[in-house]
Image (spheres, rainbow, N blue to C red):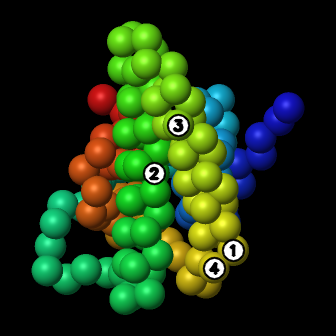
Amino acid sequence: MGYQIPDNEQERLELINDSLIKLICSDDYFDDEKWVLIRLNLDKWKRKGYSLKFETLNLNNTFKEDETLFLLRVYNLISEILLFQHGIKECVKNQEFEQAALYRDLGKVYKKTLAEKYKNKPSQLCLFDLKGNKLVMKFIENYFVNQHLMDRFRLS
């Protein structure tokens, strides 16, 4: 298995945006090994002298209305799936296996819904922008998804 990260800045930016949106809207979002391409891309930006910045809440939201709506729906689905995963662990710990099975089944339904959302995504949705010598990730409205992404990026 090999990953090819282009040297051209524009191609690399398009690759990270496309890869991240595809990953966010798939079952692979929850598989840590599937994040290698994103991590390699971010690492190449760092090696080329770029710094990584995450925008904070501002009034000049750079997403269009349809993009914001799409992202909020996707983030909500991810948050629910993460909640179901936590619920499964709690139920198993308390030996409530029927409730754990219910959470497992709901998680599967939500993961399927998440994959279907990708088919209806707005064209050219970009989570990363290039501003000078900084790779800037746009603000994510959902704190828990934001934290989960930071963990997956392996950033300190």
Distance of label 3 from label 2 (alpha carbons): 17 Å
Upstream in the sequence, badge 3 or badge 2?
2
Seen from the viewer's position, the closer of residues 69 and 44 is 69
Is 71 placed left or right of 33 in the picture?
left
Distance of label 2 from label 4 (alpha carbons): 17 Å
Q: Amino acid at mark 4?
A: Asn
**Residue 30 in view (yes/no):** no
Residue 102 got which mark? Answer: 3
Is 31 placed left or right of 135 in the picture?
right
Distance of label 1 from label 2 (alpha carbons): 16 Å
Seen from the viewer's position, the closer of residues 61 and 105 is 105
Query: Which image quadrant: the C terminus?
Result: top left
Query: For numbered disc 2, what is the local secondary structure?
Result: helix
Query: For numbered disc 4, what is the local secondary structure?
Result: loop
The residue pinned by badge 1 equals 119
State the residue at coordinates (38%, 49%): 79
Residue 78 got which mark? Answer: 2
Say whether marks 4 and 1 touch (CB < 8 Å).
yes
The residue pinned by badge 4 equals 120
Upstream in the sequence, badge 4 or badge 3?
3
